[in-house]
């Protein structure tokens, strides 16, 4: 079963960026997250959505809405 949520350090590993970069992406709204009982969690779907947006921006995949 796929992991549903990732701690910021694990999200950083998945994306290949620093933990600081993940918090910056969360702050700018580029990466969605939730806060639960003092923990910041990044949903797995948010990681995929962010990666797809980067690929689209870079022209690596065609935007299906276009």
Image: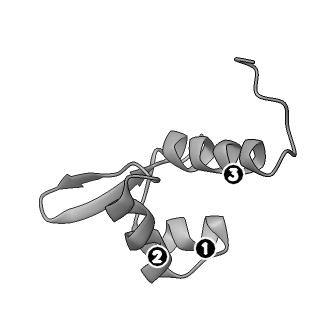
Q: Which mark is residue 40?
A: none
Q: Which quadrant holds residue 1?
A: top right
Q: Are marks 3 and 2 in contact (CB under 8 Å)?
A: no
Are there few (<14), some (14-19), or many (20+) residues within 10 Å of tag 2?
some
Extreme residue in the left direction: 37
Q: Tell me the element at label 2.
A: helix
Residue closer to the observer: 13 or 23: 23
Question: In the picture, residue 60 is in which quadrant?
Answer: top right
For the rendered model, the colour scheme is: one colour
Up the image or down, 5 lies above or below 9; here it is: above
Q: Pointer 1: residues within 10 angstroms few (<14), some, or many (20+)? A: few
Rounded to the nearest whole Å, what is the CA distance between mark 1 and mark 3? 16 Å
- Horizontal and vertical percent position of residue 5: 42, 51
At 65% across and 44% down in the image, what residue appears? Answer: 53
- Residue 52 position within the rendered picture, expressed as x and y whole percent measured from the top left: 69, 42
- The answer to whether mark 1 and mark 2 are in CB contact below 8 A is yes
Residue position marked by numbered label 3 in the rendering: 54
Q: Secondary structure at mark 3?
A: helix
Counting other residues with Cα less than 10 Å from the Cα at mark 3, is it few (<14), some (14-19), or many (20 or more)?
few
Q: Residue at x 38, y 71 (%)?
A: 23
Residue located 49% across and 76% down the image: 21
Left-right relation of 4 to 23 = right
Quarter of the picture holding the C terminus: top right
Task: Pick the residue in front: 25 or 2.
Answer: 25
């Amino acid at each position: 079963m796929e992991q549903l949520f990732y701690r910021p350090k694990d999200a950083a590993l998945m994306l290949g960026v620093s933990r600081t970069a993940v918090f910056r992406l969360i702050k700018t709204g580029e990466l969605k997250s939730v806060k639960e009982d003092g923990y910041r969690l990044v949903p797995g779907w948010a990681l995929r959505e962010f990666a797809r947006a980067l690929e689209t921006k870079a022209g690596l995949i065609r935007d299906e809405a276009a």
